[in-house]
Amino acid sequence: MYSRLLKLDKLYGAQNYKSLQVILRQGKGVHVTDIEGKEYYDFLSSYSSVNQGHCHPRLVKVMKDQCEKLTLCSRAFYNENLCNFFEYMHKKFGYDKSLPMNTGVEASETAVKLARLWGYKTKEIPQDKAEFIVARNNFWGRSIAACSSSSDPSCFTNFGPFVPGFHFVDFNNLQELEYVLKTRPNVVGFMVEPIQGEAGIQIPDDDYLVKAKMLCEKYNCLLICDEVQTGIGRTGKMLASHTIKPDMVVLGKALSGGMMPVSCVLGDNKVMDLVDPGTHGSTYGGNPLGTAIVPHAVDIIESEGLLENAEKRGKQFRDELKIFVDLGTLKDVRGKGLLNAIELHNEESANELVDKMMSRGLLTKVTREGTIRMCPPLVISDMEMDNSLNIIRRCLTEL
């Protein structure tokens, strides 16, 4: 069956992903099962989309119930769940308003548009002169605007011409950030991941976001935190940017617990009240099905103790594998909560380790330059983490 399905994928599917050679059929909690019945620990979590675990029964029930009522009505009409969603997000995250979309890249594009709108209407910069700052090695998708703001050649090569006005600064470099803010008066926003995910789980200094926020305020620029991967409990906090209040926060992925695409931008009235009807939207954004799921998906993170579990299991993971750094097998082990990475000395070794772990029942992928993402669902138990670590240790000793 494997060969037949892989052949169908190659014949009829655009080859825009280099997937591991495993075909999955089911998922439950921290486990996924392939078409031959082999069970694996999932240490990718769909790039941090299933923080609540695969097919959480509470979310499955909510989805089933709502599917029998109303799934889509577009924003041409109000829907009950969306109105309740707005109130829930306001109370939970403390922002005046939210703007729902579907995917993370849609929400990030929305944040860029909102920042530009604020720049013209409030900061009063000249029309069509808005500029934007992003960190090198950022990743927020593969749309044309996202490609335009990427420093990764695989993201932008052969896809130009690009959206103008993006300026790059090194991640965790406040001096460079201030220089661009000082010399580019038409900058309207600085969008940054609190921890860079696709760049290999790069963690900034503890005061980086605090000082970045101060600089943005000093130079009249909006700070936007892209929490599509880091948000909804992944780092052991509901938001990784919990030490500050960014001007906007972008959420996605785990916002719906992996049930369907739901994303949104959080912001206060100084930005959100600038939006006029017809200037931005999405047919599916804010649909009754997605907005029914979100409050339950977020509540599970708190009510089931997943924030505390992410802290404990993440520390357990890092503490147990540090010995391999001392031995020289690993270059580094790093992370916050259950957003972790192990870094090897070269990409060849990293790919070999991924293959070995897959053969022994643990799935994940190389993210960049010999770094492997290690991000299981937040529901992982002490015993499940021990079993996973046994697999990882055994594979490391065989390199």
Image: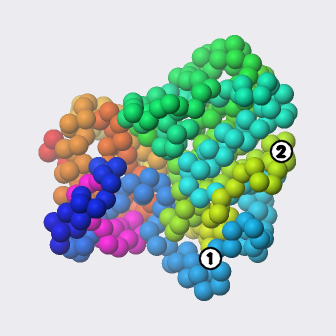
The structure residue drawn at horizontal position 46% and vertical position 66%, both measured from the top left corner, is 53
Q: Is residue 334 left or right of residue 96?
A: left
User: In this orientation, which residue lies closer to the viewer: 151 or 381?
Assistant: 151
Q: Residue furthest front?
A: 161
**Quadrant in which the N terminus is drawn:** bottom left
Reply above or below: 220 against 337: above
Q: Position of residue 42 (x, y in %)?
A: 35, 60
Is 204 one of the magenta-colored residues? no
Q: Is residue 182 left or right of residue 296?
A: right
Reply above or below: 292 against 44: below
Residue wearing tag 2: 274
Q: Which residues fall within the magenta stretch? A: 19-33
The structure residue drawn at horizontal position 80% and vertical position 48%, both measured from the top left corner, is 275
Q: Residues within 10 Å of mark 2 (few under 14, many from 20)?
A: few
Q: Position of residue 244 (x, y in %)?
A: 71, 38
Q: Position of residue 41 (x, y in %)?
A: 32, 62
Is 20 one of the magenta-colored residues? yes
Q: Element type at marker 2?
A: loop
The structure residue drawn at horizontal position 84% and vertical position 28%, both measured from the top left corner, is 124
Q: Which mark is residue 71?
A: 1
Q: Residues within 10 Å of mark 1 (few under 14, many from 20)?
A: some
Q: Position of residue 223 (x, y in %)?
A: 70, 34
Three-letter code, disc 2? Leu
**Quadrant in which the C terminus is drawn:** top left
Q: Residue 294's quadrant in the figure?
A: bottom right
The structure residue drawn at horizontal position 32% and vertical position 43%, both measured from the top left corner, is 366
